[in-house]
Amino acid sequence: MSVRMIDTFQGIDKCFTDKGFCKEKWDQYISDYLPYARETIEKDSAEYHFAQQVLPVLNAVCDKKKEIAKLHHSFLHLTDNIDEKIRQKLQTQIDTVIVLYMGLCNGAGWVVSFSGIPHVLLGIEKILELNWHSENEMKGLIYHELGHIWHKQSRTAAFPSPNTPKDKALWQLYSEGIAMYCEQLLCDNDQFYHQNKDGWLDWCMENRSLLFAEYIRVIENQESHQKFFGDWCSYLNVSDIGYYLGCELVKTACETGTASHVLNLSLHEIETILYKCID
């Protein structure tokens, strides 16, 4: 098992002419680097209006040479010796492929399996659009997805199939917490949150009990927990609180359980630990 890299940085210029992005040239580019992914990429992109939503983002890449270079540097630095870092920090290995590529606005960070092997697809055009090319932002893209893959490949218990709003809220809190905890382990910083801007972490820490109490209230009343996840949603005008709460839940679980046990929690155990978080 190992982490492998596909770096298409040197080939992205092939996707453009002097008039901008050229789909025919992209077809050749993706066939050179990721032929088995082309159908999946195009199928996902077809959900958007190409001329209005996709093409402007792709054309904008031409004017961001400095940002692309910084993005590429961040990618190289964060993936350098990543196998050894995973072995040291997670006490295991992960089987995956990390790909830096020019997509069709599929996502800045996207995990798709090909032939049973998860691929972390890092879309250059979306990373640039979101201004996530710094090393700190790229940690969130790469290490967080590695956390989800670590969980999937290390868990020996069956994955549950959450059906009720309560079970879905419990599982998302836990699974995102595992991924966030993985970020911190790989960064060797138990206070690292890629969401931490403008006092975000300080605010979460100051309101920890209130936030856990609200999450519990939401699940007990079978309300939507969406306000805790996604930068387009918020609670008390603050986004992504669920990542903080999830990581705190996992850390609480680690106080009394081994890493193996924490990676194999049941929905009942997750709920029990959640209530401990407001004690």
Image (spheres, rainbow, N blue to C red):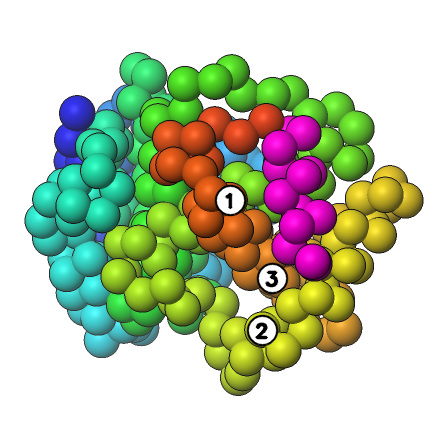
Q: Which residue is mark 3?
A: 240
Q: Residue at coordinates 65% horizontally, 68% vertically from top-left?
A: 208
Whole-angstrom CA distance, mark 3 to mark 2, is: 13 Å
Q: Amino acid at mark 1?
A: Ala
Label 1: which secondary element:
helix
> How far apart in space, not on screen, are marks 1 and 2 (Cα)?
18 Å
Q: Is residue 32 visible?
A: no
Q: Looking at the picture, which amino acid does disc 3 mark?
A: Asp
Q: Which residues are magenta?
A: 267-279
Across and down, in percent, residue 27 comes to 29, 35
Q: Is residue 117 magenta?
A: no
Residue highlighted by disc 2: 205
For marks 1 and 2 on the same chain, the one whose residue lies earlier in the sequence: 2
Say which residue appears at 33% left-offset and 17% top-offset: 116
Q: Please state which of residues 111 and 235 is positioned toward the viewer in this rendering.
A: 235
Q: Which residue is mark 1?
A: 253
* Nearer to the camera, 183 or 124: 183
The residue located at (79%, 59%) in the rendering is: 214
Q: Secondary structure at mark 3?
A: loop
For the residue carrying disc 3, how many other residues have a C-alpha within 10 Å: few (<14), some (14-19), or many (20+)?
Answer: many
User: Which class describes the residues within 10 Å of circle 2: few (<14), some (14-19), or many (20+)?
Assistant: some
Q: Position of residue 91 (x, y in %)?
A: 21, 38
Q: CA distance from mark 3 to mark 1?
A: 21 Å
Q: Quadrant of residue 213?
A: bottom right
